[in-house]
Image (cartoon, rainbow, N blue to C red):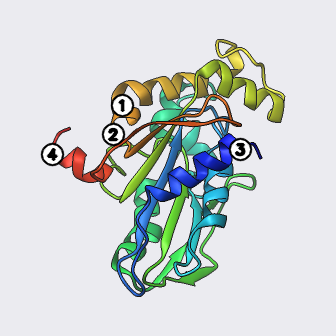
Amino acid sequence: MSDQRTEFLGALLALMPVPELHGPNLIVGIDGVDGVDGSGKTRLADELAARMPESSPVVRVSIDGFHHVREKRYRRGPRSPEGFWLDSYDYEQFRQEVIDPFRSGRGTYLSAGHDVDSDRLLSGPRRDVQQGSILLVDGIFLHRPELVDVWDLTVFLDVPFMESVRRMSVRDGLPGDPDAEENTRYVGGQKLYLSECRPADRATIHVDYRHLDRPRIRRAARQPAHQRHREGT
């Protein structure tokens, strides 16, 4: 890991409040521009989780564990940007099974409600919610209207499509051109998201993430993302 990335992680952690012992849980969203997983959200969330204070239990969840079943995801066609934007995730289930338990600080949560590879719905395992925890969620579209009010803090990883698609091509063998037909669904859906939700403006922390070895915090707001949204800023 480069010195610049280590410094970035330290600066990011310094901007995150630490829950009090047995106090309200902290819910953090790591959002980013990509097609499937090209912005590096999961890696960053895992690195942050490993560096969180030992006094606060850290729970890692991905929005990718709450996909709709394949039939619903692709009902508008396999390359439909609108389908990717509108039909990918079951936000109602995510809120009910993850956000509500952590917000109340009691009961159990489900870390995933769907297995995207097998297209199988999941009902367990369920785990207990501990008060004073940090829930760290990574995923795309986290500043949608269905979710914008759930976060205490959000990080938006800003990556040009040319770079995010290149990362996907290295990992998954997809074409490295954002305009390639194979990327229509994902790039087009992300453009709809950027246009309709303005995540770079709504996020608590906006990060220039085009260079993985030297990320840079562009802006850090004082107010939580959901509070600024409610005030119309």
Q: Is residue 79 above or below residue 232?
A: above
Query: Of the residues tagged 3 and 4, which is closer to the observer?
Result: 3
Q: Spatial distance from mark 3 to mark 4, Cα to Cα?
A: 38 Å
Q: Earlier in the sequence, mark 3 or mark 2?
A: 3
Residue at the disc numbered 1: 198
Corner quadrant of residue 218: top left
Amino acid type indicated by mark 1? Arg
Residue at the disc numbered 3: 3
Corner quadrant of residue 53: bottom right
Residue at the disc numbered 2: 202
> Would you say 223 lies left or right of 43 here?
left
**Helix, strand, or loop for circle 4?**
loop
Corner quadrant of residue 233: top left
- Which mark identifies residue 6? none
Q: Is residue 124 above or below residue 87?
A: below
Q: Mark 2 and 1 residues: CB-CB less than 8 Å, in contact? A: yes
- Name which residue lies at 59% across and 78% down: 54
**Residue 26 placed where, x, y %?**
41, 68
- Pick whichever, 107 or 228, lies toward us: 228
**Helix, strand, or loop for circle 2?**
helix
**Helix, strand, or loop for circle 1?**
loop
- Name which residue lies at 68% across and 54% down: 119
- Which mark identifies residue 231? 4
Q: How many marks?
A: 4
